[in-house]
Amino acid sequence: MHSFEYQHGELYCEQVPVSRVAKELGTPCYIYSHATLVRHFHAYDSAFKNIPHVIAFAMKANSNLAILRIMAKEGSGADIVSGGELFRALKAGVPASKIVFAGVGKSPDEIRDALKADILMFNVESSAEIHAINEVAASVGKKARIALRINPDVDPKTHPYISTGMKKSKFGIASDRALEEYKMASSLSHTDVVGVHAHIGSQLTDVTPFVDSLKKVVALIDTLKGQGINIRYLNIGGGLGITYSEEKPPLPQDLAEAISPLVKDLGLTLVMEPGRVIVGNAGILLTRALYEKAGETKHFVIVDAAMNDLIRPSLYGAYHDIRPVKEEAIRRTKQTVDIVGPVCESGDFLAKDRLLPNVKPGELLAVMSAGAYGFVMASNYNSRPRVPEVLVNGGEFHVIRERETCDDLIRGERIPSFLNETE
């Protein structure tokens, strides 16, 4: 459920017509709904109210400071994958005690900064990383809390690029080596082995892979306890899907009901890392049609947003619903079109072979479900300034990131003096 609905003949975000945002800020731009973000967070949090738990919002989905502040105010922590995300999370007021640090390639500096901040734990991905964390912890006189990420070899039945729990994945430690790695980690002087972590993929539309993965992890926890290894946290990752098109993903309550029988009597704190399910349908990308172009075999609608603003369609072939901002346009004759941007790449598209009502140049279109992996994956390709982000709260909207300028494009660049020498 989200807060983007037609009212008074046009698309609104909460009580704000999105055309008003376009008029004041221009297009393209991202628009997020505060009410939707809060509602989605509490849907997840309340689903697990009977189990001790920590929600660590997967900020790779959306790392804007205002979004993170909303999550922190509602009680969330953060799942981070870089030193930059650690900086952002702390800057936004996320408690370090609720931050978990994932990712396969943590640098010594990133590990050191996280230890100094006293984060909840590191999700470690390899034997080499365990030793690296131990060495850095020793150098700063701390003991690092760690959870080993186990690869349960479960097929999440999602896009290959966002499947992370199978044998061929770069993520995690093979389950048949887990006990050996846990024993090694427990023997080190500056690591405190506190958890087990398993994250099998993103945009999952069925709870069965979660259950299959968890059964393997629970069996491992029993074995570890038998070896005297005191596991205190069970991190099940994130990955619950959202509706982009015709998907019917389970609700957080469905996930809770499916896994509660497996975890409720373990005496552990459950850690969860939802991202897309909270923020995905809480945001849109607003764009304006520039031109129509009739090719020999295709009809194109050229808009001012491009793959550098929202890369998911080009990268994954991902589907995003596209709606006209004016409600009357829905009733027009439909035609099959490609919605494409100005970037100089054949892969620059937001939709291909999409049956849409006729779009007229100058009209506004809303690219739906763009709150996750939207702006956060944006680039300056073709020297295009990145677009603004807007947060709507009731009848007001707030700019939470300004539109970049051409000066922003060259910030930090230098022309060496020898290039300025005259012949």
Image (cartoon, rainbow, N blue to C red):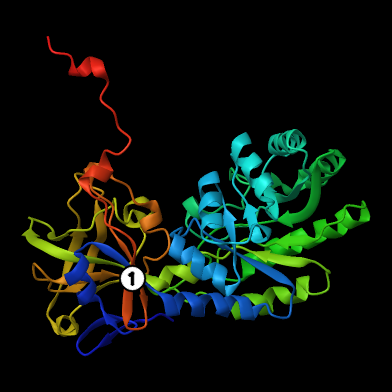
Identify whether 3 is placed above or below 314: below
The quarter of the picture where residue 358 lies is bottom left
Left or right relative to 183: residue 233: left
| Image quadrant assignment for residue 96 | bottom right
The residue singled out by tag 1 in the image is 398
**188 with respect to 146 (left or right):** right
Residue 222 figure quarter: bottom right
- Under circle 1, the secondary element is strand
Depth check: 136 or 344 in front?
A: 136
Q: Is residue 51 above or below residue 151?
A: below
Q: Is residue 112 visible?
A: yes
Residue at 8% across, 67% down: 361
Disc 1 marks a residue whose amino acid type is His
In the rendered image, the vertical position of residue 62 relative to residue 407, given as above or below: below
Which part of the image, by quadrant, shows the C terminus? top left
- How many neighbours does mark 1 have within 10 angstroms: few (below 14), some (14-19), or many (20 or more)? some
Judge by depth and name the residue closer to the eye, 403 or 343. Answer: 403
Q: Residue furthest top?
A: 423
Residue 107 seen in the figure: no
Measuring from the top left, give residue 367's x and y in whole percent: 29, 68
Hey, which residue is sitting farthest bottom in the picture? Answer: 8
Count of marks placed on residues: 1
List x then y, in percent, for residue 331. Answer: 16, 85
Q: Position of residue 401 (x, y in %)?
A: 34, 59
- Quadrant location, the N terminus: bottom left
Q: Is 388 on the left or on the right of 90, as rendered?
A: left
Q: Horizontal and vertical percent for residue 275? A: 52, 64
Question: Front-most of 199 and 175?
Answer: 199
